[in-house]
Amino acid sequence: MSIVAHAHPFVVGVDTHARNHVYAILDATNGALLDTRSFPTTAAGINRAIKWVARRTNADADTLWVIEGAASYGAILAGTVATHGFPVAEAPGMDAKKRLGVGKSDALDAHRIAMAVLPLPVDKLRRPRLHDGVRQGVRILVTARGSMSKDRTRSVNALNALVRGNDLGIDARQKLTGAQITEVSKWRSREEELSLSIARAEAVRLAKHVLALDEQLTVNENQLDELVKVSEASPLLEETGFRAISAAKCLAAWSHEGRVRNEAAFASLAGVNPIPASSGNTVRHRLNRGGDRSLNSALHMVAVVRMAHDGDTRGYVEKRRAEGRTDKEIRRCIKRYLARRIYRTLSAAAIAMTRLDRHRRVDRWNSPGCEWVFLIQFVAAQSLAALRESARGYSNRSAGGPSAGKGCLIRRRGPNRPASARAWWRSRPGTNPAAMSVSWPPRAGAPGSCR
């Protein structure tokens, strides 16, 4: 198993902040600090930082970037660095005790971040999530839904406390129902004692706020449903117990193919991996209280629904109860099974979508109506190569080089260079030579036409 110090020539540690990011470059072979510098968090500052790192590392594409807060302050930086083709990892957790007697600064933190990953195995690095397309949209909506749900819970609790502490003429012996909240929102001001009048107005405000949040949560769920149906998580909607919200949380945690190395790591991420809790003659496992609690909450709700409404799951529950297992232990086993199933479903869907996209691109490239587009690209590429050769020829001739006296345009033909555009097109894999006789312009709406 290779470690970071053996797999990457350089490591860049980044301590992220709102205004400036601090970068520290390390030579991975010996851990020597090469340079440290701070750049602004703007797009121009990030591009300057990437160019600075490229100069200091000889533009080595295997340079590992370790970014603190890759999902918050360092999200834009992580996405930009990944776009340039560099490997990116999230900063590992560090022990604060190691700072005793050394001090703290942004430059020291960036140095510690880079040093912390050198002894780690490459497959143990935490890869950041992708911040584009459907995944980012799902993540934003899931985060917004969590905030709205907490706000709704606070408002409902405040409304319950208000109607129980003041005689407003509503039965508050139990928690207010949706119908009662709607009734409270329609109250009008009355001629009554001042404190009751103020309490009634506040109750109306809270009730209207709860109803408004209900509408926003419904819109949020509809948006999540639309995004999930066009993502890798769409097969989960066919499973018992899964709805758009739970499937979206699973997709947001999984992010993309390759981020989580296997289903055991996904179970650990979800906090459902079994933790040994045996002692003496007792052999048992307990729940994991770590991991992504939002993902764990989604698995918990799916497990509860399946235990109540899925026939196979109910049979499994009865079997485990006969073995002396508690409902909590049975639920843990079901959540572990769900983590395995979700990981395999998402991975299989990602592979299928990648293959489908590849086939679509190949079919479009091979369509008769599109061949002239590629011929134009070929001619443009050949013209650009000719201009470069021309400039090189002028330079050599002026310097008395080997091309002096041979003219400004030098055309070289190698074994891998086609003699013409038609030969180049015919040499493409899967191309039908008979398709070269297609008329120009291609008829709009014809089979294989680009238009």
Image (cartoon, rainbow, N blue to C red):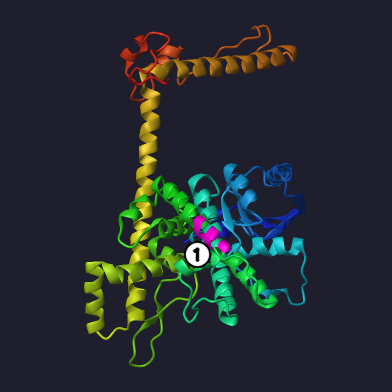
**Which residue: 30% across, 68% down?**
306
Q: Given the current orientation, which residue lies at the most extreme bottom position?
A: 280
Which x, y percent locates residue 229? 39, 47
State the residue position of label 1: 182
Which x, y percent locates residue 449? 38, 19
The answer to whether one can see residue 257 in this image is no
Q: Nearer the viewer, residue 7 or 185?
A: 185
Magenta residue span: 208-215
Q: Is residue 342 above or below residue 381?
A: below
| Quadrant of the image occupied by residue 144 | bottom right
**Which residue: 67% across, 6% down?**
405
Residue type indicated by callout 1: Thr
**Which residue: 38% across, 81% down?**
285
Q: Nearer the viewer, residue 413 or 315?
A: 315
Magenta stretch contains residue 211: yes
Question: Is residue 161 toward the left or the right of residue 328 in the image?
Answer: right
Which x, y percent locates residue 166? 60, 80
